[in-house]
Amino acid sequence: MVVRFHLSKQLSNREFESFYNLMYKHVLLQSKSCNTASKRDAKSAPSRLVNRDGKLQICLDQLSLDTRRRYLKNPFNTVLDLKWRWTIVIFSVGFISTWLFFAIVYYLLALIHGDLSGDRKENEIPCLQNVKSFSSAFLFSLETQHTIGYGYRNPSSECSGAVFVVYIQFIVGIAVQCVTAGIIVAKLQTGKRTHNAIMFSELACVGICNNSVCLMVRIGNAGPSELVNVKGSGVIIERLKLEESGDSNTEALSETVVEFVSDSGSSNINLLWPAVIHCQIKENAKQMIKRLQSVRTELIVVLEGVFDSTGRNVQLRRSFLPHEIEIGKQFVDISPQLVKNQQTNAYCHTVDIDGFDAIQTDKLWERLISSSGND
């Protein structure tokens, strides 16, 4: 690369040095930006539909008020979708509001019955024993809702209204506690740590598997709970521009559904140790590889299974862009190896998890592709 500059005036040594450093940085940045085609494609690629954590990056625009109400009609699922901090805020506000509401009711009952007046007779039984202020009414409401037990403050049979309110607060308190416990248990079961135990390889690769051209991804379970009834599928999404449309930014998404199977060809994937799942490319291999390497293509791998500890169904997703799909590669074998522990003299099967993302050149790739009619 040759760059020529023409200076219209004589520069001093300091000016020339600053000018030279500026041009050198500019040329260096230009050379780095033109390093490889894959890096250029990665920068110009559209944003993912599914991010690296498996979350959908889709926003519903111009939702009507009626459509939003449909989501709010099921408050249980609405709270489940919220973050933990907002869930705790809602629960705190719910408990405090019920305590305050019934405290106000008890305070009004005591006020109407005359328990708060100073001229009450000594032999007259109050509606609520030892409730002489709003703070004591609030403590009485707290004790009633959580069945802590009556001691210094307690209701009496002289006021039927107080007995009825206590009955209502018992029902409301039990309902609030049951809903709270159910939502917390449900959110704990859908926690991020459980999902993070399932690992996807950083790269996907296209190579030879079972004497066929296959698209391969490695998955593994790093958690103590076993994932059973595992099924794998995928979607190849291509962004197509609509040339006939007046808007040049209008695009259409083309979907191609693929099914991933285990090394043995079974649709039921075994995750006792890290496994490589593959999808056989049945159509023209050269054409499929060209589609996967297009800058406007995204591969989404979907994994479904059941955790045996909770019996809960889970679905996990992972997205691969063209620069994350290697052609003519194979995953390095990390099958369990029988190793003897030198300290305990016991044998155990060990998996080298450091090689989970390791790939190598497929030796059969060039030979099979050159001998086939796909090229």
Image: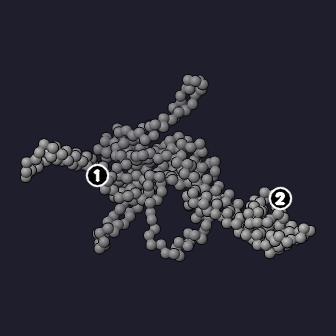
- Disc nearer the start of the sequence (1/2): 1
Question: Is 334 placed left or right of 141 in the picture?
Answer: left
Q: Is residue 9 visible?
A: yes
Determine the CA span between mark 1 and mark 2.
Answer: 76 Å
Scheme of image coloration: one colour
Q: Residues within 10 Å of mark 2 (few under 14, many from 20)?
A: few
Of 84 and 334, nearer the camera is: 84
State the quadrant of the N terminus. top left
Instruction: Tell me residue 285's x, y (percent).
Output: 34, 51
Expressed as whole percent of the image width and height from the top left, the position of residue 114 reads 82, 73
Mark nearest the camera among 1 and 2 is: 2
Q: Amino acid type of disc 1?
A: Arg
Q: Residue at x 31, y 41 (%)?
A: 367
Please indicate whether residue 98 sits to the left or right of residue 305 in the image: right
Q: Position of residue 8 (x, y in %)?
A: 7, 52
Residue to which mark 1 is pinned: 40
Which element type, helix, strand or loop, lies under badge 1? helix
State the SS at label 2.
loop
